[in-house]
Amino acid sequence: MPRAKGGPKTRARRKKRLKLAKGQYGAKSRLFR
């Protein structure tokens, strides 16, 4: 996975990812790659 240089912005993205993964781990998390 490529690391994005954004700082806090990337952290927020990770939080969103975790929320999506909690709801639909198989489908959305893969598409969100």
Image (cartoon, helix red, strand yellow):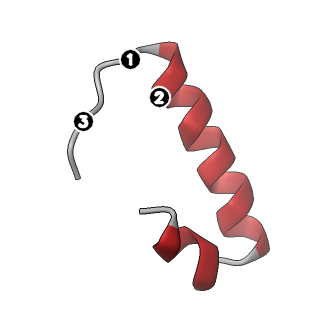
* Amino acid identity at mark 1: Gly
- Vertical side of 5 occupied by 32: above or below: below
Query: Label 3: which residue?
Result: 3
The quadrant of the image that shows the C terminus is bottom left
- Vertical side of 17 occupied by 30: above or below: below
Question: Which secondary structure lies at badge 1?
Answer: loop
Query: Could you tell me which residue is drawn at 62 percent across and 73 percent down?
Result: 28
What is the spatial separation of the Cα atoms under label 3 and label 2, in whole angstroms?
Answer: 9 Å
Question: Which secondary structure lies at badge 2?
Answer: helix
Check disc 2: other Cα within 10 Å, few if <14, some if 14-19, many if 20+: few
| Disc sitting over residue 10 in the figure | 2
**Pointers 3 and 2 in contact (C-beta within 8 Å):** yes
**Pointers 1 and 3 in contact (C-beta within 8 Å):** no
Check disc 1: other Cα within 10 Å, few if <14, some if 14-19, many if 20+: few
Query: Could you tell me which residue is drawn at 79 percent across and 71 percent down?
Result: 23
* Amino acid identity at mark 3: Arg
Query: Label 1: which residue?
Result: 6
* Amino acid identity at mark 2: Thr
